[in-house]
Image (tube, rainbow, N blue to C red):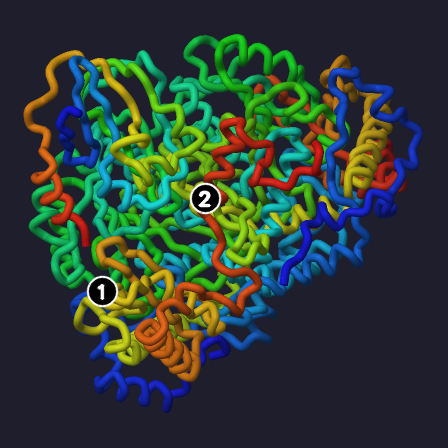
Amino acid sequence: MAERRYTKTHEWLTVDGKTATVGISEFAQSQLGDVVFLDLPSPGRKIARGESFGVIESVKAASDLYAPVAGTIAAVNDKLTSNPELVNSDPYGEGWILKLQMTGEAPADLMDEATYKKMAEGTSH
Amino acid sequence: MSEPLSFELSRPGAEPPRLPAPGLSAAPSADVLPKEHLRVKPADLPRLSEAEIMRHYSRLASLNYSISEQFYPLGSCTMKYNPVANEAAAALPGFAGLHPYQDEETVQGALELMWRLERALCAVVGVDRVTLQPAAGAHGEWTALRMIQAYHHSRGDKRTEVLVPDSAHGTNPASAALSGFQVVEVRSGRDGRISLSDLESKLSPRVAALMLTNPNTLGLFEREILDVAEMVHATGAMLYYDGANLNAFMGVCRPGDMGFDAVHMNLHKTFTTPHGGGGPGAGPVGVKAELVPFLPHPTVEKADGHFKLDFRRPKSIGRVRSFYGNFGMLVRAYTYVLAMGGDGLTQASKDAVLSANYLRKQVDGVLEIPHHGPCMHEFVATAHNLASQGVRALDVAKGLLDRDFYAPTIYFPLVVPEAIMVEPTETESKATLDAFAEALKEIVQEAKTNPAALHQAPRNTPVGRLDEVGTARRITAYLTGQSEEPVLRWKRAGK
Amino acid sequence: MPYLVHSPQEREEMLAAIGVESMDDLLVDIPSSLRIHELKLPDGLSELDTMAEINALAGKNRVFADRLTFRGGGVYRRFIPTAVAAVTGKPEFYSAYTPYQPEASQGTLQAIFEFQTLIAELTGLDVANASLYDGATAVAEASMMARVHTGRDEVLVAGYLHPEYLEVLRAFGEGRGMKVRRGEEPTAKTAALVFQQPDFLGLLVDARGLTEKAHAAGALAIACVDPISLAILAPPGEYGADIAVGEGQQLGLAPSYGGPHVGFIACRKELVRRLPGRLIGSSFDSAGRRGFVLTLTAREQHIRREKATSNICTNHSLCALAASVYMTYMGEAGLRQVAETSFQRAHALAERLAKLPGWELAFPERQFLNEFPVIVPKPGPVLRKLARKGILGGLEVGRWFRELRGVVTFTCTEVNDPAAINQLLEVLTS
């Protein structure tokens, strides 16, 4: 398994060749609470790095999802339509959100697990 | 305790009510109208006798808490007692029976009431004119921002940003965004007041307005408000007042004198029109002279003792609602203003501040109060020291419901974790405040000795905590075609 | 002072408990330069004197009898069952707060859930919300939904939409980058085609044809409808409109010089997540008891803040409650009877008015329900003459539409009995 890296906006990313898989972090799912809905784009759409590509909703919060890397959407996790709770129960596995065909290299400034954890702890109350 | 839906009580065989027959010779609609205009499938409405209807709604009424029976310590909502005279006034045939397109000469009393209410509101907040058209507070906010936008545009000044403090009501950023502005957040300082240095760094020629409420959502008066106003005005921006907290200082000071250029008011808070279980309200907006040309039309004008509607306002932002606003709510508010007078409104605000400080004193030590010094009409406490017992602000709120109090505002403002925001208002007696403080003590005690019980609260209400997550997920299942159950409405079985 | 509760002695006790000497000690944060010492308003009055003043103001207005009111234009006289005020006058309803604490608000929540169902049934659409401010803002909010849904900027308004609704739509559109145009030919830029059925003049439009036109251009069809007409007329759901909106004043609310009334909005299920305002859903507690909650709240302003699609945080609950009581009282058969009686009386009246010398129907080839436009010679003096005889005659619509100078719309409902209609004709022929 490729190394998981993180954004400041709590998305994670793993890279396999030119394909990136994107989800939200364990910390993000715990802050959101029970996820009830994801508004996700259709495959084929091009997105820029940092662009908001969707919304994730729990009963108490709604949060935009941002692309950690530029690319074309190759696949969206259809299971989340009927089972949005997968984001809570398995954020790094079955709760993945989408796959991107990257247009360039993965940016070098994404955080590794340890750096991200430190940042996340700093932001929680 | 539960009540079936009217649809479930419905008896299809029940006779329809007796209603007038046409009594004139004319063809029925089915013979006149082309078929493509006619309804095919009749609406599935319930059918009940009047007796059954009255019982159904009486039972539903008994499931509600209301200000007529319970204390609502809801911060930022100003839940005062709603005088019954207001209701009688609005129901007078001389008001309730008026058609909005009657000729001006036949509605002089209605126009005079609006004119007088406008003058009274001007006196309370210190502005030059007021529009009574917006139907609610958020509607008023948006109306004010549209006026500010039109003002800047009229000067050839395309400003694109609106500054909103991080402690502001959620409607502020939403209203700004829907007027086409970019929202820029201004941070609160350590004492909960707006940070002047952060404000300074965010002010620029791009900024159209700063939206502020004073006292702020922590119940603290922004002591440096005159400096804030000067800084904002120096960059050519306007200062907007969110009137949610107006009950703190009627007759004590005025937003207009503080430098605010536009002020919205909630008649359903400060001026005792009832909340109605979520509306109708009314959200008039007051403005200083430079914004007057942009007021929504029509305005009410007086000339030679005659009142008229003025539609000839070329710079007006237009209309924000049909007709003249929620007129019935204006009648209620004016009735209250007459009964209270200048002396009564002033005393009301002083009593509201007194009650808040008194209750704050009783609560201090029971719950932690993060900010020092006297508060205005409300205060914010926090339940974060109960977290070690696994008890959250929500549990405290639910515990209060079990003790026959409505819950305070929780998780707001966002800048205080586990916030519990309490606004007692001037219409609650010292005995009620004491009883409320006592109930809070009991709950905090319970949090320490038996937190599990609090997680089960409320138990004395018609239903316990409802599965909101399940509801939202069932809706998603319906919307994505995986379930036939609409969740957002009743549906006849097998249909 | 009737609404204040503390006695002077209690105030002293409370100050002492706080540990301050005087009220001014609590107001120290207010700069002294800002302090005022009184409001420039007269002192308060007793209830007796307050009501005398209020009655005097009400007395300066002229109220026309229901049965002699033939003016509509968006606000109509209808028979209001006594049960409506008996329910909305209950303080447990009118003095309750917004139902954010569901355990303490089941009465309001269930009543509004019933309202959502009633409106969905009436419009033939999947889901309705908990209500909006009025018909005008409902049109504007629906247009905003279409804009977000389609990603297109232009809203096209076909035919005679209520002119004040159009004005509100324009005011909403400005600043939100939504262009509003009158016309019937949607293009690839059109987010929605809006039409009113029956239109502002009372005439039926080709709702089905307009809906198909909208869909052919990839736009949404928004139907602004009269709720009582839906007992007879095809509802938006039957001709495929995407969103139905309207003004609910006729469902048990007094004219009240234009408000408060209630807007409604219903849509196909594909659009539910774009619905503005409050939505109530059914739920269960841990004991399995059914209850109702505000749901999908993450769409709303208090969570989404600047990302919300609407800044609405109020509905018109109490007015929606009135409408629910009204619809429940009427049932489908009652509503149909009210609509049918209005239809037949209006047609009888139209026939008689058209026979007056110089009078004619403005659009004789068009169908209508209970409101219709007539060309009237010298409408001003005619309407003034009627008013002198206690009759509120029709509405001059040339005030809004130049091409309709001299056109007056008359409306007729179940409250205008045959004798009232005779009285109107007698004055007009005298």
Say few, some or many: other residues with alpha carbon within 10 Å of mark 1 (under 14 / 14 to 19 / 20 or more): many
In front: B180, or B173?
A: B173
Residue at mark 2: chain: B
Is the same chain shared between marks 2 and 1? Answer: yes
Comparing labels 2 and 1, the label whose residue is closer to the camera = 1
Q: Is residue B390 above or below residue C230?
A: below
Secondary structure at numbered mark 1? loop
Residue at left offset 64%, top offset 25%: C237
Instruction: Report the residue marked by disc 1.
Output: B220
Residue to which mark 2 is pinned: B299
Amino acid type, residue under disc 2 in the picture = Thr
Q: Residue at x 15, y 50 (%)?
A: B187
* Crowding near the residue tagged with mark 2, few <14, some 14–19, many ≥20 C-alpha atoms within 10 Å: many
User: Percent from the top left, x then y, of residue A33?
Assistant: 33, 46
Classify residue A13 as left or right of residue C5: left
- Residue B265 sits in quarter: bottom left
Given residues B428 and B476, the one toward you in this image is B476
Q: Tell which residue pokes out farthest to the front in this image.
A: A1
